Image: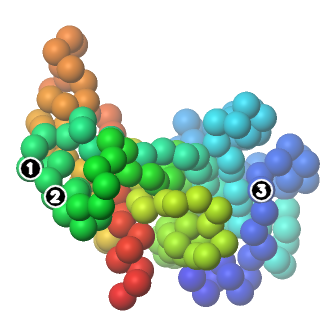
Amino acid sequence: MAFLIEQCSFCELTEDVINSCLLFSCGNDDLDDFFRNDATRYAHFLMGKTYCFRLNSNPSIIVCAFTISNDSIRIYDLPRSRKDYMKSLTNHEKPLKRYPGVLIGRLGVNIGFARQGIGSEVLDFIKGWFFSSNNKTGCRFVIVDAVNAPEVISFYQKNDFRMLFSSEKQEITYTVGEKDVPTTLDTRLMYFDLLNMRG
């Protein structure tokens, strides 16, 4: 995480920051539109908070941005085998219907800094942030609804995220329901267990 920590400054993505910076683009129209137009509304309505790293040598450049919100893994919505596996991770403490986590709702890297490992540095930062003693709540998992594309899934897997469901078919069965069943999903649920950071 050397680049972000050594060469960038971390802050909330506010209207003032957006207006004082060059136009942020990560090359994805949907993400770009969210960071430019929707992120601050999400914060206003307490639906998620967006943060960014700005380049120290030129603070008008946003290197990357991400949005996080509270979430959970709903254990009793899972098939038996996955439910048993997830329960095994918590050493069968008092049975809970949900295990607490933080959702990475959006993550974008400035196209000028693409393919330099910035995305992985952001994930490392988020993991460390919620694993630290400064975290004000219990948070066991980092969760993401990853775009169902090989390069995106591979990116998260390389950063030690695992699929919540063992197959896309299983995820469709347990998350979509009976009506309008798609043949493929737009996103796949993935998670990182923060206890893995204990080493």
Residue 185 higher or lower than 148, as above or below: above
Report how far apart the C-alphas of labels 1 and 2 lie in the structure: 6 Å
Between disc 1 and disc 3, the foreground one is: 1
The disc labelled 1 sits on which kind of residue?
Ser
Label 2's element?
Answer: helix
Label 1's element?
Answer: helix
Q: In which quarter of the image is residue 140?
A: bottom left
Pick whichever, 46 or 87, lies toward us. Answer: 87
Q: Position of residue 5 (x, y in %)?
A: 68, 82
Q: Quadrant of residue 31?
A: top right
Label 3's element?
Answer: strand
Residue 184 higher or lower than 112, as above or below: above
Report how far apart the C-alphas of labels 2 and 3 lie in the structure: 36 Å
CA neighbours of label 1 inside 10 A, class few (<14), some (14 to 19), many (20+): few
**Residue at mark 1:** 81
Q: Position of residue 19 (x, y in %)?
A: 89, 46
Q: Which mark is residue 142?
A: none
Quadrant of the snapshot with the C terminus: bottom left
Lateral position of residue 175 relative to residue 80, left or right: right
Whether residues under marks 2 and 3 lie with C-beta atoms below 8 angstroms apart, the answer is no
The disc labelled 2 sits on which kind of residue?
Tyr
**Residue at mark 2:** 85
Asked whether residue 195 appears in the rendered view, the answer is yes
Q: Quadrant of residue 59?
A: bottom right
CA neighbours of label 2 inside 10 A, class few (<14), some (14 to 19), many (20+): few
**Residue at mark 3:** 12
Lateral position of residue 145 relative to residue 136, left or right: left
Residue at point 41%, 60% (across, down): 141
**N-terminal label among 2 and 3:** 3
